[in-house]
């Protein structure tokens, strides 16, 4: 059986000047190199052996990292050494002499500052774009009043639908969660509805009462937000595009991170089958469309806001 030379074998031979395959067999030197057991010193016969002693916690973290990112031990050691040297030189240039824990804390703080600034700039840009799209929807609504013919109304409604889809995609792009460093955020209510006037009405009502409320225009957009957002309650429209509200609610109740969040359905239909959905999906209540301000007061029962 002929052994084909891999990219890692080529890298090994280039780095060490040794053969990875000799007389049809993989060499011991290459196997040790894969495990990170040797560091080769060019121009010298000295070949120091690397011996690592890790406590169980670090060993498990190492193994999990290799599994998650597809790193082999040799590559992890090489890139780890390169990164460590680079960071230490950077800290030295900044006049900082830090141990490993202090270095980790320093990098985390710097990354947080960078990400917070980036998030702030994204929010400002997102706000400007949303203002333009809302203006387009506003002008479209005015046009419907001015041109009430059936064909004109249908055309304008299609424009509004496309604007809503565009808003959803833009919001998803700008609010991609950076969960590893910043971690989850909390809010009181997440409202999920594809009809912008409904979201505007609900948002204004609760913000006047100092309730922290966020919004999403689809189940897909909500899924993305929930990776970095922990609402105390979810207001969920049943008739969503794509994944509908009752299916989305079932998914929420299957996940440990979201199953305890109360869900209140928003729906234009309240028949026996709709009521049955409360049991099937484990939603706590429903609000019927069209609704007024008094109908939203039921939310406070489940928020249990002090």
Image (tube, helix red, strand yellow):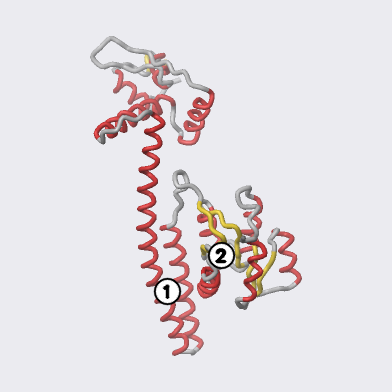
Percent x, y for residue 129?
37, 67
Residue drawn at (74%, 68%), measured in percent from left and top? Answer: 273
| Residue 7 showing in the rendered view | no
Residue drawn at (47%, 18%), measured in percent from left and top? Answer: 53
Confirm or deny contact between disc 1 and disc 2 (CB under 8 A).
no
Q: Nearer the viewer, residue 54 or 280?
A: 54
Q: Nearer the viewer, residue 29 or 258?
A: 258
Crowdedness near tag 2: few (<14), some (14–19) or many (≥20) residues, C-alpha within 10 Å: many
Q: Which residue does the numbered mark 2 point to in the structure image?
A: 192
Percent x, y for residue 57?
53, 27
Percent x, y for residue 50?
39, 16
- Establish if 76 lies above or below 22: below
- Establish if 217 lies above or below 106: below
- Helix, strand or loop for disc 1: helix
- Establish if 135 lies above or below 65: below
Q: Nearer the viewer, residue 54 or 186?
A: 186
Q: Residue furthest top?
A: 45
| Residue 133 showing in the rendered view | yes
Percent x, y for residue 216?
52, 63
Closer to the chain start, of discs 1 and 2, is 1
Crowdedness near tag 1: few (<14), some (14–19) or many (≥20) residues, C-alpha within 10 Å: some
Q: CA distance from mark 1 to mark 2?
A: 18 Å
Q: Which residue does the numbered mark 1 point to in the structure image?
A: 134
Residue drawn at (40%, 68%), measured in percent from left and top? Answer: 130
Q: Which mark is residue 277?
A: none
- Helix, strand or loop for disc 2: strand
């Amino acid at each position: 059986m002929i052994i084909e030379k891999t990219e890692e074998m080529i890298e090994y031979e280039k780095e060490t000047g040794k053969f990875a395959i000799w007389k049809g067999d993989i060499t011991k030197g290459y196997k040790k190199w894969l495990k990170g057991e040797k560091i080769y010193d060019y121009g010298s016969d000295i070949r120091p052996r690397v011996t690592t002693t890790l406590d169980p916690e670090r060993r498990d973290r190492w193994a999990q990292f290799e599994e998650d990112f597809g790193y082999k031990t040799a590559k992890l050691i090489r890139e780890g050494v390169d990164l460590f040297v680079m960071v230490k030189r950077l800290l030295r240039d900044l006049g900082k002499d830090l141990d490993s824990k202090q270095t980790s804390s320093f990098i985390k703080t710097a990354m947080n500052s960078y990400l917070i600034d980036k998030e702030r700039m994204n929010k400002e840009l997102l706000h400007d774009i949303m203002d333009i799209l809302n203006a387009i929807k506003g002008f479209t609504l005015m046009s419907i009043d001015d041109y009430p013919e059936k064909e004109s109304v249908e055309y304008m409604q299609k424009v509004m639908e496309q604007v809503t889809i565009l808003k959803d995609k833009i919001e998803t792009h700008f609010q991609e969660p950076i969960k590893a460093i910043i971690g989850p955020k909390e809010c009181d209510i997440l409202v999920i509805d594809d009809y912008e006037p409904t979201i505007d009405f609900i948002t204004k009502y609760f913000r006047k009462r100092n309730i922290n409320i966020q919004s999403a225009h689809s189940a897909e957009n909500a899924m993305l937000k929930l990776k970095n957002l922990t609402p105390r309650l979810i207001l969920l429209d049943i008739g969503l595009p794509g994944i509908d509200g009752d299916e989305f609610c079932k998914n929420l109740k299957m996940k440990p991170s979201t199953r305890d969040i109360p869900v209140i359905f928003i729906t234009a239909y309240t028949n026996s089958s709709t009521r049955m959905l409360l049991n099937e999906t484990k939603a706590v209540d429903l609000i019927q469309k069209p609704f007024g301000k008094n109908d939203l007061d039921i939310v406070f029962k489940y928020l249990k806001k002090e």
